[in-house]
Image (spheres, rainbow, N blue to C red):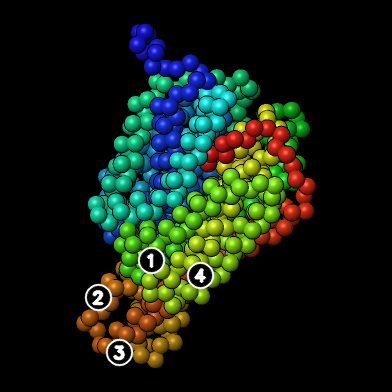
Amino acid sequence: MSAQATKSIPATGEWNPRLAILLAMAMFVLVVDTSLMNVSISAVVVDLHTTVSGVQAAIALEALVSAAFILISSKVGDLIGRKLAYVLGLLGYAIGALAMTLAQDLNTIIIFWAIFGGIGASLLLPAMQSLIHGNFEGAAQKRVYAMVGASMAIAAAVGPLLGGFVTTFMSWRVGFLLELIIIAVVLSGIRMVKDVPYTGNRGVDFVGAAFSVVGMGGIVLGILIWQEGGERVGAFMAAGAVSLALFGWWLVRRKRDGKVTLIDPDLFRSIIFRLGISGQMLQQIALGGTMIVVPVFLQMVLDYNAMQAGLSIAPLSLTMFAVAMLAGRRAGTRRASSIIRAGYLLLTIGMLIMIPIVPRANSGLWLAIPLIIAGAGLGLLVSQLNNYTLAPISQERISEAAGVNSAAGSFGLSFGLAMAGGLMLAALSFSFITMAQASAVIPPADQQRVATVLEEDAQILSDAQLQALLVSQPQAISDEILRINTDARNRALQVALLVPLLAGLLGLLTSIRMMRQPDVKPSADIEGVALG
C-alpha cells in the first residue's frame, strides 16, 4: 500500500469525519426508504397498474424480512466479517433501489425491493453497530453515534416531505435513484472502514434460526394472504405461532445442554427487558398502522398528490422528531417508565380523536391536531424505550439484546402494516356488499356487480377518478354509488385505525406494569446500541 493510501485510513479509534458522515448517510437511506413508498402509494399504483393492497403488502413484507432475518444475519456478520456484511447489506439496498427505479410490475418490487432490500437491512444494522465500535473509541465513538442517530431522526422527520416533493414534481422513481446514488457514495469510501474480527463461538444454531424466521414470517404472511383473498390463512398463522413457541423451547433446551443458541434465552429472565421489547413492538405496531392508513386516506379519499400527503403527514413525523430530541435531553430525574406511560397515553388520545374525524375530514388539516398529539406520544416513546429495555443487560450481552430489541421492533412494524391494511380491505369488502344490497336506488339485479366493481376500484381509483367514470350513469345511480364508496372507505379507514389505537392501549397497560418495577441504572454503555 502506498504512503498516500495509508494516510487516507486513520488509525483505529481516531476521529474520522469522512467515515462518520458516510455511516450517517447509510442510516439515512435505511430510514427514508419506507417513507418514500408510503407517500407514493397512489403514484406507484397508477404507474404499475397494481392495487393499494399489493403495494401495502410489499411495504409490510420488506419490514417482515428485515425482522425475520436480523437475528441470523447478525451471526452471519460474525462469521463472514462485519465489513463484508456491511457491504452486502448496502448492495442489497442498492439492488432494491435500482429495482424500484426500473420496475414495471409489482413482482419486481416484491422480489428485489422487499426481499433483497429487507435482507440487506438485516445485514446492515448489526454490522454498522459493530463497525462503529471497532473503528472509533471514546469521545469519537459517541460523536459517531450522535451523528448516525441524528441522521436516523432527520430521515424519519423529513422522509414524507422529501418523498412527496420528489414524487409530485419529478417521479417516485427519482427518489429511489437518489438512494442508489447515496449508496454508491457510501461504498466509495469502504476502504476507510477497518474490519472488526469476531472472537466468540463460531457455531450456528440453524434450527433456532429456522424457527424464528418461520415464526415471524408465518404470522405476517398469513395476514397478507388474508387481505389478498388467499387460502390457508389459518394454516400460515398457526404455523407461525407454533414455530415461535418451539423457538422458545428450543433455545431453553440448547442452553441447558450447553450448546450454542441463536440468542441467549437468559435475556428474558429480566422482566424489565421483557416489558421493554413488548413496548418496542407495540410502539412499532402503532407507527406501522398509522403510516399506512393515513397516506391511503389522503391519497385515495382526498385525492391528494404525494406532496400534499407528505405535508399532511408532516405534523406526525416532525413532532415525533422534535419531542424525541427534547425528551432525550431534558428527561432529567424523571423515571423512564413514567415518560413511556405519558407517550402511550398521548398516542392513544391522538388515535381516539382521529377516528371520529375521518368521515368529516375534507382536508388533511383536519388531521393535524390528532397527528401532533400522536407524534408527541411516539416521540416520548422513541426517547426512552431503547434505554429502558437495555438498562438491565450486562456489557457482554448488550449487542445481542439490542438485536432482539430491533427484531421485535421490525416485527411490530410489519405486523402493524399488514394488520391495518388487512382490516381496511376486509372492512371495505363487507361495507360495499352490505351497503349495495341495502340500497333502495340501485336495482337488485345490479347490486352484487356494483359491490364487486367498487371493491376493485377502491384499490385503484381515488374518489375523484371514480366520479369521472360515472358521468354516463343516471344521476341518482351515480350519486348513490359515490355515497356508498365514500361511506365504505371512511368506515374501513376507521376500522384500520383501531390497530394503532389498540396498540396504544396495550402499550399503556404495559407501561403501568413498568411503573411497578424499580428503576435500573444501566449496567453498560448503551449509547447508540439500538440503531434499528
Q: Separation of disc 4 and disc 1 at Cα?
A: 13 Å
* Residue pointed to by mark 4: 354
- Within-10-Å neighbours for mark 4: few <14, some 14–19, many 20+: many
Earlier residue among tags 2 and 3: 2
Q: Which residue carries the number 1 mark?
A: 298
Vertical order, 108 against 42 (above or below): above
Q: In which quarter of the image is residue 341?
A: bottom right
Kind of residue at disc 1: Leu
Report the Cα–Cα distance between label 2 and label 3: 15 Å
Residue on which disc 2 sits: 469
Amino acid type indicated by mark 4: Met
Q: In the picture provided, is 509 more to the left or to the right than 321?
A: right
Q: What element carries label 2?
A: helix
Mark 4 or 2: in front is 4
User: Quick check: marks 1 and 3 in contact, CB under 8 Å?
Assistant: no
Of all residues, the one furthest to the bottom in this rendering is 440
Foreground of the two, 232 or 421: 421
Mark 3 belongs to which amino acid?
Ala
* Residue type of the residue flagged with mark 2: Leu
Residue 476, disc = 3
Examine the image and state in which quarter residue 455 appears.
Answer: bottom left
